[in-house]
Image (cartoon, rainbow, N blue to C red):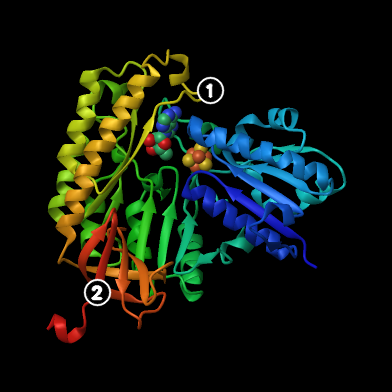
Amino acid sequence: MRPQAFIQTYGCQMNEHDSNQMRNVLAAEGYAFTDKPERAALIVVNTCSVRGNPENKVYSFLGTLRDLKRQKPDLVVAVAGCVAQQEGENILRREKSVDLVFGPDNLFRLPEMVRAAREGKRLCETGWMPRQRKIQNFIPEEWAERGHVDGVKAYIAITKGCNNMCTYCIVPHTRGREVSRESKNILREARSLVDRGAKEIWLLGQNVNSYRASKDYRFHALLDELSRVDGLERIRFTSPHPKDWDNTLTDLMAERANICNHLHLPFQAGSDRVLHAMRRNHTLEEYLAKIEYLQRRIPGIALTTDLIVGFPGETEEDFERTLFALETVRFSQVFAFKYSPRPGTAAAQIEDDVPRGEKEERLARVLDLQSQITEEQMTEQRDTVQRVLIDGAHPRQRGAMDGRTDGYRPISVTDDTLEIGDLVDVRVTGHRGHWLQGEVVRESARA
Ligand code: 5AD
Ligand code: SF4
């Protein structure tokens, strides 16, 4: 019987993508996959250290593996991802059940590392890939055309690492300096994914729009070329940085039907003083001017964002600027987090002086305001016609299929003729929570 691997993923889409790459390299070694850790010969915990919460989850999950390891001494437990990169040997010291710790740059060496662990070694592989130039094909050639297609969707990593040094952020410490892949590799990967059924491709990078293959070939040029790939119905990307977003990107989005009208543009804080202390390199006014252009050029565009409450020194007045930004932009979804100091970052040197209760209260105020805005937006969607990509069967309702609108809103469509991968026009009939409901607009009804 083939050995089974269990992979547990925390964190961002880049981590999900890394887990998919691990599945690819392990499948080539003869592994099958299970969703039951107790059946696995290999467990990989792909970790995230971006905030306190995901990091704690990692350690409590590792704790649950101790008994399993005692019962099955042959089991190999590996810790990958950002916590692994940052904590390295400490994890081996703290968790005796862990055999292998490796960082994101060592992912493609997984089979040889697991073999060494099977021979009884405890390994910590957190070195960086030899860095050549700012252009680097960090996905080895032999894997570039074997990217995973998940139903209708696939990811392509276009940059790796980050040069921004936002003061609260661990990512430059765990993912290293920024490098961009050569565009011809990215395009080859995109064509291969489309040939294998991908309808929607997500471009990934810690700061995706600072992609730069040369002085004249930047994110705009890449998006432009990708949007001409035959059969590629939808392109999304995450996460862009506001300072590297310019109106020519908005124009391109407006022009090309397959670049989705959805932008996740984190603003983090509304106060210029806090933005400066976060080293974000833009003001709220600059951010809002870009949003204003986006909303003018692309009416109905869905905007989403990340923000942090309780950054050191954030006063009530500062915080109210964050609420002001939410009211002004009216995002379709907001990911709001309480600030947590990350060891080794610049902000961790400053006193974390906003009391926990205050952070919680601010977070609750953000969520309250946003749920009101989301509810109003969902109601506004009623009777509009949305282009929907069908991506799965509804888990409970027979004859209904689920999909996403261009603006990435989830929607259930009552229709028993639809298939996964169909791209259809749907009239919104209502919503439940943040989930839309609708019916296909038939040609005759549209005329
Ligand atoms: N504390 C709280 N939130 C953070 N984020 C990143 N670092 C921290 C931190 N130290 C949030 C940011 C980022 C998202 C991925 O996580 O909003 O955009
Ligand atoms: Fe978490 Fe950031 Fe690492 Fe992604 S890159 S896994 S969000 S710490």
Q: In this rendering, is residue 53 above or below 68? A: above
Question: SS of the residue at dot 2?
Answer: strand
- What's the residue at 25%, 49% (across, down)? 332
Please provide percent x and percent y for residue 187: 46, 64
Please provide percent x and percent y for residue 80: 64, 43
Residue under label 2: 439
Give 359 or 78, whichever is nearer the viewer: 359
**Quadrant of the frame with the C terminus:** bottom left
Horizontal arrangement in the rendering, residue 131 relative to residue 393 (left or right): right
- What's the residue at 32%, 74% (across, down)? 423
Residue under label 1: 344
Q: In this rendering, is residue 135 above or below 197? A: above
Q: In this rendering, is residue 434 above or below 256? A: above
Q: Quadrant of residue 274?
A: top left
Q: Quadrant of ligand 1?
A: top left
For badge 1, the amino acid type reads Gly
Horizontal arrangement in the rendering, residue 338 relative to residue 22 (left or right): left
